[in-house]
Amino acid sequence: MAHVALVGASGQAGSRILKELSNRGHSVTAIARHPEKIPALPGVTAKKGDVSDKDGLAGLLKGHDAVVTSVHFTASDPTKLIAAVRGSGAKRYLVVGGAGSLEVAPGKRLVDQPEFPAAYKAEATKGAEFLVLLKSQKDLDWTFLSPSALFVAGERTGKFRLGKDALLSNAKGSSISFEDYAVALVDEIEKPAHARQRFTVGY
């Protein structure tokens, strides 16, 4: 059993990660701006937290084996999140990443393609910047898990593929459910295989 702090536990991806952690018997501090939105689940303690309050967040993260942040990149500051993780003394930091920085061809990122939806460009660009910042950290055990292009509610099948920096796709396109993404992320917490790396999950 791991002691995990999950920031953004009431969001679309965060709520699925929370459920997966609880189902596997982990102890979770579920942090959100509105903790009343966090479901009562076994092993889960809901706490109120603000991603813009670096010191307050660091206090909430203390005593955990791993920290997971599942927050919008445009609504948070990666330097504050990283500083809070460092300040907490947590051993590992896992980030719910974006697909925009994945490559559709060598050296060609998804976010830079002309057909990339304008509505998601700012969020995708900020996510890519977060990954660059993580790569510059010399003494932080981080992992950045990018979903596929279509990241939506669906089923927990437990059947998916893992990749590195290239966008995964099949005959139906590039997609992953929040539920299966959560499986891949919790697998990584339980059996670390991508320390100081980005990886991706898709069908």
Image (cartoon, rainbow, N blue to C red):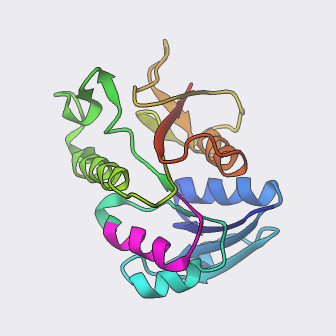
In the rendered image, residue 58 lying in the magenta stretch gets the answer no
Q: State the image coordinates of residue 183 (x, y, percent, origin top left).
A: 67, 43
How many numbered discs, if any? 0
**Magenta stretch in the rendered image:** 79-93
Q: State the image coordinates of residue 162 (x, y, percent, origin top left).
A: 57, 29
Q: Quadrant of residue 60?
A: bottom right
- Asked if residue 64 is positioned above or below residue 59 in the image, the reply reads above
Relative horizontal placement of residue 58, taking residue 102 as reference (left or right): right
Tell me, yes or no, if residue 77 can be seen here. no
Q: Quadrant of residue 29?
A: bottom right
Locate the C terminus by quadrant: top right
**Could you tell me which residue is drawn at 52 percent across and 56 percent down?**
141
Q: Main secondary structure of the magenta part?
A: helix
Which sits in the foreground, 125 or 37? 125
Relative horizontal placement of residue 119, taking residue 98 as reference (left or right): left
In the rendered image, residue 84 lying in the magenta stretch gets the answer yes
**Could you tell me which residue is drawn at 63 percent across and 47 percent down?**
182
Which sits in the foreground, 60 or 118? 60
Q: Quadrant of residue 191?
A: top right
- Asked if residue 152 is positioned above or below residue 69 in the image, the reply reads above
**Could you tell me which residue is drawn at 19 percent across and 33 percent down?**
112
Relative horizontal placement of residue 6, taking residue 144 as reference (left or right): right
